[in-house]
Image (cartoon, rainbow, N blue to C red):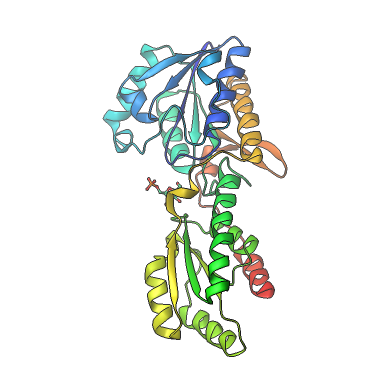
Amino acid sequence: MMKRIAVLTTGGDAPGMNPAIRSVVRCGLANNLEVMGVTRGWWGLINEDLKTMDHRSVSGIISQGGTVLKTARCAEFTTEEGQARAFNTVKKFGIDGLVVIGGNGSFFAAHKFGTKYNVPCIGIAASIDNDVNGVDVTIGYDTAINTALSAIDNIRDTATSMERIFVVEVMGRDCGIIALAVALAGGCEDVFIPERPVDLEASCHNIVQGNLIGKASWIIVAAEGAGKAEDFAKRITEMTSLETRAITLGHIQRGGRPTAFSRDLALKLGKAAVDALIAGEKDKAMGFTGGKVVSVDFEIATKKKVINTDDILKLIKTLT
Ligand code: F6P
C-alpha cells in the first residue's frame, strides 16, 4: 500500500513544472499520502537531498516558470553505483512510489531504475520540445512556442521595415516540433528541422526569385538540431548577396510564466500521476493525447517520436 511518495523534476526545466509539483503534493496529501520533494532530480535521490512537503510548501508557485525543486542532468544516475545509492535513499526514507516530472530522457532513467529495483515510478510528460512519444502535448510546450512566437513577431517588424532576412534559431536538439509550430504560426517563409536535410540552395533560390519580384524580407526558423543560425545566415548572405542576420532565442524559450494551457495540463497530470500510484500502476508516463489525459508505457514514451512534417511544410510554403 502506498503511504509515502516522492516527487522530483529532472532534465531541462519546462514552464508548468511548478504547477505539476503543486498538484502532486496537494493531491497526494488529499489522499492521505506523505509527500517528499527531491532536490535536483536524480542527484537529490543519490545524495539524500529531500524534504517533506506540506500544503504550504507549494503555495504561490502556480504562476512561476522553472521548478522550485530544481533540476539537473545527472550523469551519475546512469551508473550502477549512482542507481544503487538512489535506491538506498528510497529504502531509507520508506518511499513507496516516485513521480518523475520530465521528458523522454527522464523516463528512460525512471524505467531502468524502477524495473531494476522494483520501485513504482510514474512520469509526468514535461518538456518544451514536445518530443515524448505517444503524447500529443507535453507540459511547457505551449508556453515555449508562445514565447518564441512573440520574439518572432518582434523580429518581423525589423525584417519588414529594414528589408532583411533573419534566421531565428529555436530549441530542439533532436526534434523540429517547436520550429514547425512557430514557423507556421509566425508566418515564416522557411524552416530547417533535424528530421529533414537542409537544402540551402533551394532556399536561397526562392529568396532570390522572391527578391526579383519585390519580396524583401524573410524569416527562416532553424531548429537547433538542424544547424547554427550564425552559419546559415553567413551562407545565405554569401549565396544571395542579401543582408542576413542570425538570432538565437535559446533559454528565453525555457523560462517564463506558464500559459493557462501549460498550467491546466500540469495540474491534471499531477492528479493523474498520484491516482496511478495509488492504483498500483508503475512504469508509465502521464500525458495528454487526443484531447484527454492518457498513460503511456515508459518503453513506448521513450521511443523516437515520429512527426508528419510534410503537411506542415507544405502549408508553410503555400502560405508564403
Ligand atoms: O530538453 C529541452 C532542451 O531545451 C532542448 O531543446 C535543448 O537542446 C536542451 O534542452 C538544452 O539543454 P541545456 O539547458 O542543458 O543546455
Q: How many marks?
A: 0
The quadrant of the picture occupied by the N terminus is top right
Q: Position of residue 44 (x, y in %)?
A: 35, 25
User: Nearest the camera: 53 or 28?
Assistant: 53
Q: With 221 as the anchor, is 232 left or right in this view? A: left
Query: In the displayed structure, would residue 236 be above or below residue 285?
Result: below
Residue sitting at the far left: 81
The quadrant of the picture occupied by the C terminus is bottom right
Residue sitting at the far right: 291
Residue sitting at the far front: 161
* Residue found 43% across the figure and 71% down from its top: 245
Q: Tell me, yes or no, if residue 244 can be seen here.
A: yes
Query: In the displayed structure, would residue 21 be above or below residue 134?
Result: above
Query: In the displayed structure, would residue 178 be above or below residue 257?
Result: below
User: Nearest the camera: 157 or 18?
Assistant: 157
Q: Position of residue 7 (x, y in %)?
A: 48, 24
Q: Position of residue 304 (x, y in %)?
A: 51, 52
Residue sitting at the far bottom: 212
Q: Position of residue 215 (x, y in %)?
A: 60, 82
* Residue found 59% across the figure and 24% down from its top: 23
Q: Tell me, yes or no, if residue 283 can be seen here.
A: no
Q: Give the image quarter of residue 39.
A: top left
Q: Give the image quarter of residue 138.
A: top right
* Residue found 54% across the figure and 14% down from its top: 56
Query: In the displayed structure, would residue 160 be above or below residue 214?
Result: above
* Residue found 62% across the figure and 20% down from its top: 279
